[in-house]
Amino acid sequence: MAQASQDELYAVADFCLIPMGTGEPSVGPQIAECQRVLEKSGLTYKGLMHHLAQLHGYGTNIGMFLLVGSRLVSRSREEGPWSAVSKAIHDCHAAVHALGTPRVATDIRIGTRTDKEIAPGTGNDGKVQRVVDILAQDKK
């Protein structure tokens, strides 16, 4: 069974960070800064994909970047202990604010499970592989 302690729940998160109020049409520097934070976090994460459609453990993203009005926003998935995942999202907000961005909004989806053991860094990959295996049966 996966760890059931509330402060050590293993979490898989999908989040979309939206910098606002920069006065510029591009938010590329803010998105890049969030990606740097995620790289330094030590968590398993996926972002900056080049695929047009990307299946992941919580659905399918059509592109890894979404346009809100005319603005680019970041979409990332990460997994690890709940506290570390939450801290990484917090740190993305703090880093983007430190660049002078007055407002940052984030849509977050977090899942946990305690019914089976999940090896660290494999939560999303296992979900995706299950769907890929099912679809492979269609081709037989």
Image (cartoon, rainbow, N blue to C red):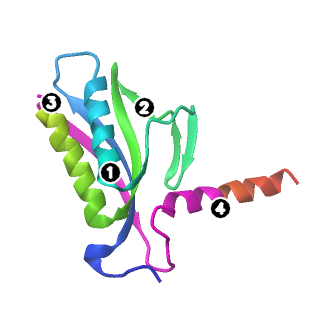
**For residue 111, what is the image quadrant?**
bottom left
Whether 22 is drawn above or below 65: the answer is above
Find the distance from the CA under tag 4 to the CA under tag 2: 25 Å
| Residue numbers of the magenta segment | 100-129
Whether 140 is drawn above or below 94: the answer is below
Residue at the outermost right position? 140
Q: Identify the residue position indicated by label 1 in the image.
A: 108
Q: Is residue 105 part of the magenta span, yes or no? A: yes
Name which residue type carries label 4.
Arg
Residue 9 rendering spot, x and y as whole percentages: 34, 73
Find the distance from the CA under tag 4 to the CA under tag 1: 23 Å
**Circle 3 — which element?**
loop
Q: Which residue appears at 50% of the width and 36% of the height?
A: 49
Indicate left or right for 123 with 107 as reference: right
Name which residue type carries label 3.
Leu
Find the distance from the CA under tag 4 to the CA under tag 3: 40 Å
Q: Which residue appears at 58% of the width and 36% of the height?
A: 53
Q: Identify the residue position indicated by label 4 in the image.
A: 130
Residue contact at pointers 4 and 1, CB within 8 angstroms: no
Q: Which mark is residue 65?
A: 2
Q: Upstream in the sequence, badge 1 or badge 3?
A: 3
**Circle 1 — which element?**
strand
Q: Nearer the viewer, mark 1 or mark 3?
A: 3
**Circle 4 — which element?**
helix
